[in-house]
Amino acid sequence: MELELKKAGFDTYEIGGELTLTQEETAETIVPDYCPDIARIIETEGRVFLHSRELRDGKAELSGTVRVTVLYTPEAEGGIRTLEFAMPFTVESESRALPECTVLTAQTQSEFLESRMLNPRKIFTHCKLVSRLTGYRRLPVEFCTDAASEDETLCLEKRQERQRVFLLTHIAEKDFTCSEEMNLSPGRDGAAELLSSQVTSSVTETKLVGSKLILKGVFTVSLLYRTADGRCCSSTGELPFSQIMEVEGAAEGAVASVMLQLTGTDLQIDGGDPEGRQIAVTLYLHATVLLRQELEVTLLSDLYSTAYDVAYDAAPLALTGFWEPMTRRQNVREVLEIGVVADTVLSLSVTCGTVNVSREGESVVLRTGAAVRALYLDEGGVPLVAERTVEVSCQLELPEDCTVSARAVCADEVQGSLTAGGIEVRFPVDFRAEAASRSKRVCITAARVDTEHPKDLSGAPSLVLRCLGKQENAWDLAKRYNTTIPAILAANQLEGEEALPRDQLLLIPRKRG
């Protein structure tokens, strides 16, 4: 007799593949006629903008631009000049590297960027890019929760397990534009020309209201600019933002993980401000939101009958049983030794590299290299750059069986001051991590009861006396000796399974038919 089983299911996303791709780009750039000749390159900065990401038949393709800014000292002139140009790039994975994936998330960073002068009118730029791709596939999950039969003569005993699971139910994407006016820091002179800029983002709040997800956060914009009298100054400001994304069918209480990536920037001095103290900031962004829902499900994991032989089919079911997002901040304070006497610090920047994850037991250590760069003037007014990579680490306590993915960012303004030994810098590094563990649970998929041949228990003893084994539980005893858990508890005058002793003999009555 085929036993009818109750079934349940859900749809979820799971990671179908992860790739890390590296490539190098080079370019020769002619200095435009309106720019003066280059005497010396001071530093090179780059911002990576991803414009498109496509996934077709398991093959991923990214395209974007590295927006390069070269600061240099001009020949026969003082001060600092800037040269900007774009280096387009395309990243492709091998065919079928992400099979069956339907959604692609990607992040591309510049791991190395350098420009050198070929002659006063031409420079050579070398850039190394690292792209991290994750493909997600839609996965329907079905499982049995109970045996549907109400026939008491079958004498069925069922083992049902309650399991907490975390489901990635929605992946939503949106391109949006943020336009704001930024005022230069109080006490700063107005800007005549913008030399370079840096933009970092931080999501501070997410809220799900019906089918709408509200995102709130802050952009931190740092500027290096030249004043009307030729001096260089810097200024940093925070621009709050909020966005609404449509997420149809999202469950109340779902938790959002948000990734923001710049796809372009446009910063200009406001022409309506004669003092040059207002900067028109337009930021173009791509937002990716992963929504996770916590559920408690019931799995039918074992089955037997005290009256008939039962045969069943079972299969492992992989579920995410633990997931936790976290942010840990580490405050860093370091001194950049410069070997000369500095007069003024013009700008400071921090770029965090890849996060390495190591663990021992339940202790997880996250490490990243924070590249610190300071642009300053020596006492003769010559612009110079000091660089140093600082290792920053963070320790977490997490279950041994979980995996951890993390990235590190410096989303706040970098503080700095001149000291006798060089330039002291102070900045925070935020480790944004997600810990998850997947476990396999055996779940019955089909069951059959041999109702034509009842069990022959005529020769079986009516009572067994034994201790509970180290690896045994009440279910194991009941199934082995063809009885039930309530019968064992009643025979030993115990109120619950948790009261079963392991060092005392137990009375195990057999149930006959």
Image (cartoon, grey):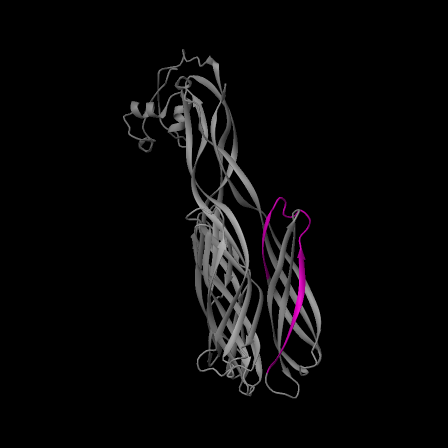
The one nearer the camera, 400 or 303, is 303
Identify whether 421 is placed above or below 469. Answer: below
Could you say which is closer to the camera, residue 504 or residue 42?
42
**Figure quadrant of residue 174:** bottom right
In the rendered structure, does residue 85 fall within the stretch colored magenta?
yes
| Whole-percent x, y for residue 212 in the image | 46, 53
Residue 300: x percent and y percent?
45, 31
Is residue 334 in sight in this rendering?
no
Q: Is residue 257 visible?
A: yes
Toward which corner of the image does residue 375 lie, by quadrant?
bottom right
Quarter in which the C terminus is drawn:
top left
For this orientation, the residue located farthest to the left is: 493
Give the residue at the far top of this rendering. Answer: 458
Residue at x 67%, y 62% (from the top left corner): 89
**In this picture, which residue range is highlighted in magenta?**
80-108
Q: Residue furthest front?
A: 272
- Provide the major secondary structure of the magenta segment: strand
Of the pair 263 and 26, the residue shown nearer to us: 263
Residue 393 is situated, as x and y percent measured from the top left of the image, at 47, 61
Q: Residue 419: horizontal and vertical position, in percent?
A: 46, 80
Q: How many marks?
A: 0
Residue plotted at (66% across, 88% down): 76
Magenta span has 230?
no
